[in-house]
Amino acid sequence: MTSFQQSALPTPAFLDTHRQDELDALFASLSATSAAELNGNYEGRLIGILGLSGLPKLAKGLTYGMLGTWINPWRGKQFMQTSGANQWGIGRHTSSWGEYSISESSDNASLMLDYNVAANPKLLRPILGEVRQLSNGLWLARMRYRTKDDIKTLLYFTLREVH
């Protein structure tokens, strides 16, 4: 298993080749963030997608690299104190879809993004995001899906402040 140190992570792309279990360990080691720290628009980058951990590092790097281009319409997230939404689009044309409420977890370990809001279709409502700070201006987050019996981590993503 790879050892992680925050200072050794110069860009989010560094995380592209890591398995989901390695990202789980990194996420568990990170500090909590508060809702007040995230406000505005944040560029997102998908990593650690369930089912891709078994791919060779080169294949994972290429896949996540491609998902960081125009091929993937997910651009990131917008945070507005107690709520937010995903940003989708191509080029400069973006729109919001997939709303969530924002709260701090009961143990103050993560910022929680709960998609169980009336504006979302039923398919999105079991989604629960968790965000922790990776470094100054960079956050590591995971998307989880709640079922009747369990909660599964579907993917990880990074968020970077848009200036």
Image: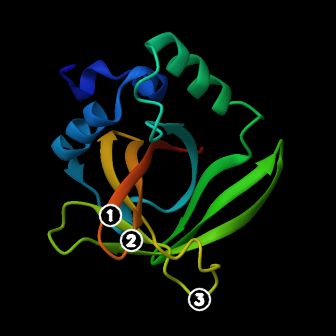
- Amino acid type, residue under disc 3 in the picture: Ala
Q: CA distance from mark 3 to mark 2?
A: 18 Å
Crowd class of label 2 (few under 14; some 14 to 19; many from 20; radius 10 Å): few
Residue 33's x, y, as percent?
28, 57
Whether residue 134 is visible: yes
Judge whether 153 appears above or below 104 on screen: above
The image position of residue 82, as x and y in percent, is 45, 78
Tag 2 or tag 3, which sits nearer the N-term? Answer: 3
Callout 2 secondary element: loop
List the residue tagged with mark 3: 118
Q: Can residue 68 be seen in this snapshot?
A: no
Element class at badge 3: loop
Which residue is at the front of the view, 23 or 93? 23
Tag 2 and tag 1, C-beta contact below 8 Å: yes
Q: Quadrant of residue 22?
A: top left
Farthest bottom residue? 118
Nearer to us: label 3 or label 1: 1
The residue positioned 21% from the left and 44% from the top of the image is 30
Q: Which residue is mark 2?
A: 147
